[in-house]
Image: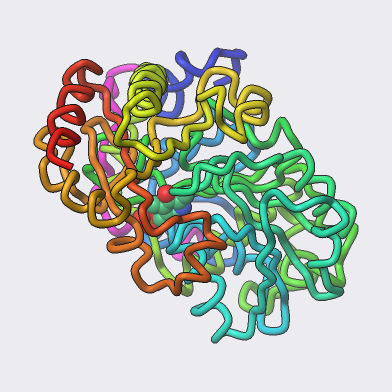
């Protein structure tokens, strides 16, 4: 939108702008393909000479209106939707890496991202060095190599809830002439805009708070437009040298600040095809409309639940960056003064077995793999999402064997606390 609206307004008003007689609500362009009048018109699209829709694997209007809204919320220059958060992180990295490249990865990233980088992308010849998100600048510097192409970390780590010192990471990445990619899923653009602190690319699993209703898996990538790829043509040949698969187009020359997202769309989407369905983008857009309201409630409820747990005699520890006792309280205040997220982690004095039996007694809070939606839910990462990890890897990821991940919803907080009270009475 042209006006400088606040985020609450962007969430409701941005993206689809109906003209006279058009639908008030964003239409679902449920079509694989788009019609043209001449063969030449179509040819120009394929040569990237003109922009326009032709096949939904590359771009779809419903998706693009929603991507535009997310782009505005993050303060970026270009954005795209992907089929999942996994696809978003994969494309964000693979767009600037190839066999022989190297990535610096925060150890506390989401388990799926950790596996993607350390196992699957390794098979593609992309190495990575795992760093402690709390490491000093000197320690971080040691992780970089000549072939390092990016740094990847999360604003608030899932499920370790480590708050990243984004400025520190951005500076280190830039000192080594590479971009910082931030997965901003847990904070959402409502609570943090990593671009304001020097991050270059932001990714999202829109499956979480953005959708907010656990209805659709999805992802997004946003480019700040701030990283000058053309300064380092040797590091980023894919953006700075001609692409033979498009008759020699050079992305940084032809698309300027749109180079990174254009390349990810016309090359990675074309060849790998992890598009979000327009149906899901429509649901995501509905979710986005209430994101600010929900985040406010998630954060308020989570703080109350965290305080309740902290004072409970059967609870051995609570980790929530909004608690004054948290090691990350100061960083959270700096980067997310409005609150971090609705997710809390805690452990019981009875350890892992007490955690498992307590969870079985919860009634309102459901045991699901999902996290970060309107309904309160709970998970034991060591036996569920992170069960493929060794004890050593769990420790590095900040996931204690007794860690319970409790995702506080937007229900009445007294009901959530009563549910915990009841379940804790059994251990
Ligand atoms: C869930 C999650 C992902 C993966 O997203 P999917 O949509 O499940 O593919 C990536 N990063 C973070 C921080 C997540 O919480």
Residue 392 in magenta? no
Give left or right: position of 9 versus 312: right
> Taking 138 as reference, is 407 above or below it?
above
Seen in the picture, residue 271 relative to 196 is either above or below; the reply is below
Q: Magenta: predominant secondary structure element?
A: loop
Q: Quadrant of residue 303?
A: top left
Classify residue 290 by image quadrant.
Answer: top left
Looking at the picture, tell me which residue is in the foreground, 221 or 351. 351
- Is 22 colored magenta in this rendering? yes
Asked whether, in this view, residue 107 is left or right of residue 287, the answer is right
Residue 143 lies left or right of residue 8; in this view the side is right
Residue drawn at x 21%, y 33% is 375
Q: Looking at this view, is 408 or 391 the one in front?
A: 391
Q: Position of residue 223 (x, y in %)?
A: 64, 45
What residue lies at 72% left-to-right and 61% top-to-bottom?
A: 150
The image shows residue 141, relative to residue 420, as above or below, that is below
- Total numbered badges shown on the rendered structure: 0
The C terminus lies in which quarter of the figure? top left
Q: Nearer the viewer, residue 288 or 384?
A: 384
Residue extent of the magenta highlight: 20-45
Q: Position of residue 377 (x, y in %)?
A: 23, 40
Give how far across and how far down residue 147 sits, in percent.
Answer: 80, 75
The residue at the point 75 percent across, 66 percent down is 149
Q: Quadrant of residue 58?
A: bottom left
Q: Is 86 left or right of 286, judged from the image as shown?
A: right
Question: Residue at horizontal 65%, vertical 48%?
Answer: 201
Quadrant where the image shows the N terminus: top right
The answer to whether residue 36 of the structure is visible from this angle is no
Colouring used for the render: rainbow
Observer-nearest residue: 275 or 294? 294
Q: Position of residue 112 (x, y in %)?
A: 43, 63
């Amino acid at each position: 939108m042209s006006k400088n609206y606040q985020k609450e307004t962007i969430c409701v008003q941005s993206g689809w702008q109906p003209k006279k007689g058009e639908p008030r609500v964003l239409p679902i362009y449920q079509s694989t393909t788009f019609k043209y009048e001449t063969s030449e018109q179509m040819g120009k699209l394929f040569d990237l000479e003109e922009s326009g829709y032709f096949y939904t694997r590359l771009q779809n209007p419903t998706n693009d209106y929603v991507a535009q809204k997310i782009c505005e919320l993050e303060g970026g220059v270009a954005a795209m939707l992907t089929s999942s958060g996994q696809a978003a992180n994969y494309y964000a990295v693979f767009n600037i890496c190839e066999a022989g490249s190297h990535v610096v990865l925060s150890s506390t990233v989401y388990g799926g991202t950790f596996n993607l980088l350390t196992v699957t992308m390794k098979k593609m010849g992309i190495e990575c060095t795992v760093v402690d998100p709390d490491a000093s600048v000197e320690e971080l510097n040691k992780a970089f190599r000549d072939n390092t192409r990016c740094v990847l970390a999360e604003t608030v780590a899932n499920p370790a809830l480590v708050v990243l010192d984004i400025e520190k990471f951005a500076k280190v990445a830039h000192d080594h002439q590479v971009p910082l990619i931030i997965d901003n899923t847990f904070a959402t653009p409502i609570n943090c805009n990593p671009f304001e602190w020097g991050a270059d690319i932001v990714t999202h699993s829109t499956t979480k708070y953005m959708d907010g209703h656990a209805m659709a898996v999805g992802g997004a990538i946003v480019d700040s437009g701030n990283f000058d790829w053309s300064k380092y043509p040797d590091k980023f040949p894919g953006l700075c040298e001609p692409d033979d698969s498009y008759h020699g187009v050079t992305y940084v020359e032809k698309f300027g600040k749109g180079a990174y997202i254009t390349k990810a769309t016309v090359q990675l989407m074309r060849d790998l095809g992890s598009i979000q369905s327009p149906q899901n983008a429509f649901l995501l857009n509905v979710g986005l409309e209430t994101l600010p309201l929900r985040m406010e409630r998630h954060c308020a409820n989570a703080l109350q639940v965290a305080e309740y747990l902290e004072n409970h005699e059967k609870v051995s520890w609570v980790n929530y960056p909004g608690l004054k006792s948290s090691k990350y309280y100061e960083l959270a205040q700096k980067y997310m003064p409005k609150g971090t997220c609705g997710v809390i982690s805690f452990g019981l004095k009875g350890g892992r077995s007490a955690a498992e039996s307590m969870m079985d007694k919860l009634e309102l809070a459901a045991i699901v793999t999902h996290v970060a939606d309107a309904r309160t839910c709970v998970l034991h990462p060591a036996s569920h999402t992170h069960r493929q990890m060794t004890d050593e890897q769990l420790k590095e990821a900040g996931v204690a064997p007794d860690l319970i991940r409790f995702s506080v919803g937007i229900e009445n907080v007294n009901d959530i606390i009563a549910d915990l009270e009841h379940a804790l009475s059994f251990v």
